[in-house]
Amino acid sequence: MSAPVILVLEDFEQARFVIRLVLEGGGYEVFEAATEAQALDLCREPEQRLDLLISDVVLREACGLRLPCGSQPCGHACPSSS
């Protein structure tokens, strides 16, 4: 069985680093995005499996609440935690 896949959307680099370390230490596969556009690009990859989105609520370019993975145009149905 493969590790659960988590997408971390966080614009603060140091926070992404710490979140990645903790999650990978727990056995999760982690993808990072610093912007909403990067997160959507990852979500749109047809073979990309995402099990959970962890999003910063206050992003420089957008609001992290606008990016639930289960909505269009992303298409994945994954729970989110913001």
Image (cartoon, rainbow, N blue to C red):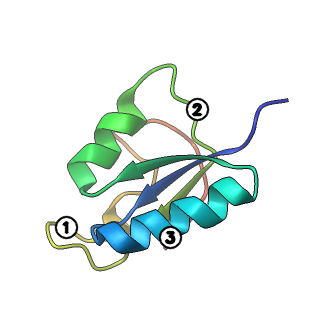
Q: In the orientation shown, which residue stands out farthest toward the left?
A: 61
Of pointers 2 and 3, the one earlier in the residue sequence = 3
User: Circle 1 is placed at which residue position?
Assistant: 62
User: Circle 2 is placed at which residue position?
Assistant: 49
Point out residue 11 in the picture as x, y percentages from the top left corner: 27, 67
Q: 10 Å neighbourhood of mark 2: few (<14), some, or many (≥20)?
A: some
The structure residue drawn at horizontal position 45% and vertical position 20%, both measured from the top left corner, is: 46
Towards the viewer: 24 or 43: 24
Q: Is 1 on the left-hand or right-hand side of 55?
A: right
Q: CA distance from mark 1 to mark 3?
A: 22 Å
Q: Can residue 70 be seen from the camera position used here?
A: no
Give the number of the mark in front: 1 or 3. Answer: 3
Q: Can residue 2 be seen from the camera position used here?
A: yes
Point out residue 57 in the picture as x, y percentages from the top left corner: 36, 77
Of pointers 1 and 2, the one earlier in the residue sequence = 2
Q: CA distance from mark 2 to mark 3?
A: 22 Å
Amino acid type, callout 2: Arg
Q: Is 17 on the left-hand or right-hand side of 5?
A: left
The structure residue drawn at horizontal position 46% and vertical position 58%, both measured from the top left corner, is: 8
State if disc 3 and disc 1 touch (CB < 8 Å).
no
* Element type where label 1 sits in the image: loop
Q: Give residue 18's mark.
A: 3
Of pointers 1 and 3, the one earlier in the residue sequence = 3
* Element type where label 2 sits in the image: loop
Give the number of the mark in front: 2 or 3. Answer: 3
Towards the viewer: 33 or 18: 18
